[in-house]
Amino acid sequence: MTPEQFLELARVLPEPLLLVSGNGQLLATNQPVADMLGLRRQELRGRMLFELVTESTNDVVKYLQACSSSRAMVIGSLTLRKNDGQTLICRSQGAVIQPWSPESSALILLRLENRTLANSNFVLLNQKIDELAKEVQRRKEAEEALKKANQELEIRVEERTTALQEILNELQLTQTQLIQAEKMSSLGQMVAGIAHEINNPVSFIYGNLHYTHEYTQDLLKLVQIYQHFCPITPPEIQEQIEEIDLDFLIQDITKIFQSMKVGTERIQEIVKSLRNFSRLDEAELKQVNIHEGIDNTLMILEHRLQARHDKYLEIKVIKKYGQLPNVTCYAGHLNQVFMNILVNAIDALEASANNSQWSAGNPQTTDNQKLTKNNPQIQIKTELIDEKWITVSIADNGLGINEQVRSKLFDPFFTTKAVGKGTGLGLSISYQIIVEKHKGELKCFSTLGKGAEFVMKIPVSLV
């Protein structure tokens, strides 16, 4: 994203946004940032982030390095120096747009929020977590003292300590889920804004293509009539006909209009998928088409399914859709589950392609591994079990999962991915959405070397 493209995007967004380089130089800002600082945007151009905050240069550099190397949004805190001499503590969310490389510096998008305006849920949770942490510590100290006095009291204290630790873990998970929910909400708002801004000019172009094509055909008919009744043309006109290659132009212009029509229809489909996936207006229970939600998710992930730079082959998606009724559910949450499981399947297939043990000369390579490496696939199957239940299964033919890992898949913060590649919350949140929010079931079936399958059992109606 260039600074100019950033400004076009930021102009329609109300939150303060900055585009900075990996070394801290301000490349572009929007008006809400200037309002927070009491400056004009022109006064911010080309300045360094270190000049505008009270944190040390070393701390700011470490934060920017974390943003540059993480695929997830990095939460931080920055204290701004306002033009009137006062300071403003802000919560920052940093996302890398262009990762750092030897050829180019990182581009980082920072979103700022006045900490005093932040969601009171986070403040309350942090207070509760601190209080419970102190209580746990006090209980542990009391346990050591009571061991010497009475074995029965020791057991009671241990039970109480365990209960409090579980509550603390639940609150920590809730806090993390709220952060994830806020990120999804911010992303959804941004997606909806971008989709709206794109849809208006595309609709204008698409609506005029039909008339432009008709007008062009009328002009070409006029040219043909002229050629019929005036076969002998002046040299100047004949020279121009040859220069523009009129015969080719007449044949090619129809193809051009057809390709423009296909292109605008494709953009409209993508915009519709983005809006349907975010479903910001459908936070409550609503009847939806499950297949539409899956297809919208696949369209958003299409860039990861295509072959890339001779490193990854195209991932073939096989759909085996059954006849399903509309399902009364929380549509946006179910789309999030589809996204999490499909992303994990794609990651597994890419890991299979990178597995150094899979080679034509390796005698330990199984037939299934060879098939996966040469023909990566994701199979999506839906089925109506009875009038009350449906199932959705998503299976890949990747490396598979061993029993030790499979038993921990839905545990919060458990991940097998490298640091910065995953939070360990995707499947945990998916499990909560399917099992707790929709009263359904989510299971994983896998054998090492033979892929993995996630099966969701969802009620037709929660009402």
Image (cartoon, rainbow, N blue to C red):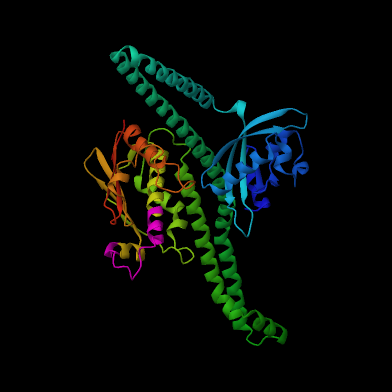
Q: Quadrant of residue 437?
A: top left
Which quadrant of the rendered structure holds the C terminus?
top left
Q: Is residue 462 left or right of residue 283?
A: left
Magenta span = 347-368
- 222 or 1, nearer to the observer: 1
Query: Would you say residue 355 sits in the magenta stretch?
Result: yes
Residue nearest the viewer, comparing 80 with 199: 80
Q: Is residue 28 above or below residue 302?
A: above
> From the viewer's perspective, is 183 left or right of 411?
right
Question: Which residue is at 29% across, 64% downward?
Answer: 364
- Which residue is situated farthest in the front direction here? 148
User: For the point 53% across and 44% down, which residue is it?
Assistant: 191
Q: Is there any visible trace of residue 380 in the rendered image?
A: no
Q: Residue 73, position in %: x, y?
A: 54, 42
Q: Position of residue 43 (x, y in %)?
A: 78, 42
Q: Residue furthest left?
A: 386
Q: Would residue 459 be counted in the magenta stretch? A: no
